[in-house]
Amino acid sequence: MYVDIALMMSFLGVAILLTLMPGPDILFVIAQSLSQNRKAGIATALGLCSGLIVHIAAATLGVSALIYQSALAFAIVKYAGAAYLLYLAWQSLKESGEGLTLGNQKTLEYKALYKKGIVMNLLNPKVSLFFLALLPQFVNSSLGHVPLQMFILGIIFLVQALVIFTVVSIFAEKLRNVLLTNQLIAKRIHLIKGMLLGLIAVQIAFSKK
């Protein structure tokens, strides 16, 4: 047995609470679901969780520690991520006057949203540092295979995050449908999305190690 079941269940509880906190990832999923639909949110969530695989591997192999030790590397990745999100926010703000309807016929590029999710996650160095700090606390060194234990815990985090993001996408779409009954709000959906993306960019830009 490579994992401690008691520690694993404790980790799952902590992971769920942390995933539900209003951080960059969940806000990004909400923004896409509000502005488009639940499929857009789920596509984004799949991208974010795909990016998590890289962070989990980095924490397991010790690459995250190298990023933590290099102030320059941390700053470059952090500000690149913030700049990318500000660009997405600017795109949304440009579309803020278009408005939306329940029957929006615009083709949704789910593959593009998936890629955006990956890029956004990879350009947030705090995720790797988060795993570097969290995973070792739930490892039972007496069982050996510490890197493998960390990787298994990381995959557990990924799966529960994908489930939660999917549920959040569904509820965000329901909220969107309610909001769209108000014409004033309907015309401001892209503005709301842009503001959310801007908030995420600020969170990342001003994050510290």
Image (tube, rainbow, N blue to C red):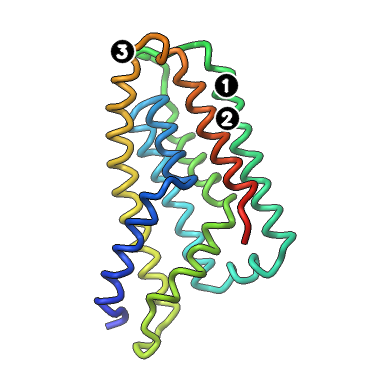
x and y percentages locating residue 130 in the rendered image? 50, 63
Which one is in front, 186 or 117?
186
Report which quarter residue 72 is drawn in.
bottom right
- Horizontally, is 192 left or right of 89 in the view? left
x and y percentages locating residue 202 in the rendered image? 61, 41
Which numbered circle lies on residue 93? 1
Q: Is residue 134 above or below residue 189?
A: below
Q: Is residue 87 above or below residue 129?
A: above
Q: Residue at x 31, y 12 (%)?
A: 181
**Which image quarter is the C terminus in?**
bottom right
Dot in front, 1 or 3: 3
Q: Which residue type does callout 1 highlight? A: Leu
Mark 3 or mark 2: whose residue is earlier in sequence: 2
Report which quarter residue 37 is drawn in.
top left
Q: Residues within 10 Å of mark 2 (few under 14, many from 20)?
A: many
Which one is in front, 10 or 46?
10
Q: Which residue type does callout 2 highlight? A: Ala
Q: Residue at x 71, y 53 (%)?
A: 76
Mark 2 sits on what residue? Answer: 89
* Alpha carbon separation for disc pair 3 and 2: 24 Å
Asked if disc 3 and disc 2 are in contact, CB closer than 8 Å, the reply is: no
Q: Which residue type does callout 3 highlight? A: Thr
Mark 3 sits on what residue? Answer: 181
Asked if disc 1 and disc 2 are in contact, CB closer than 8 Å, the reply is: yes
Q: Residue at x 40, y 50 (%)?
A: 21
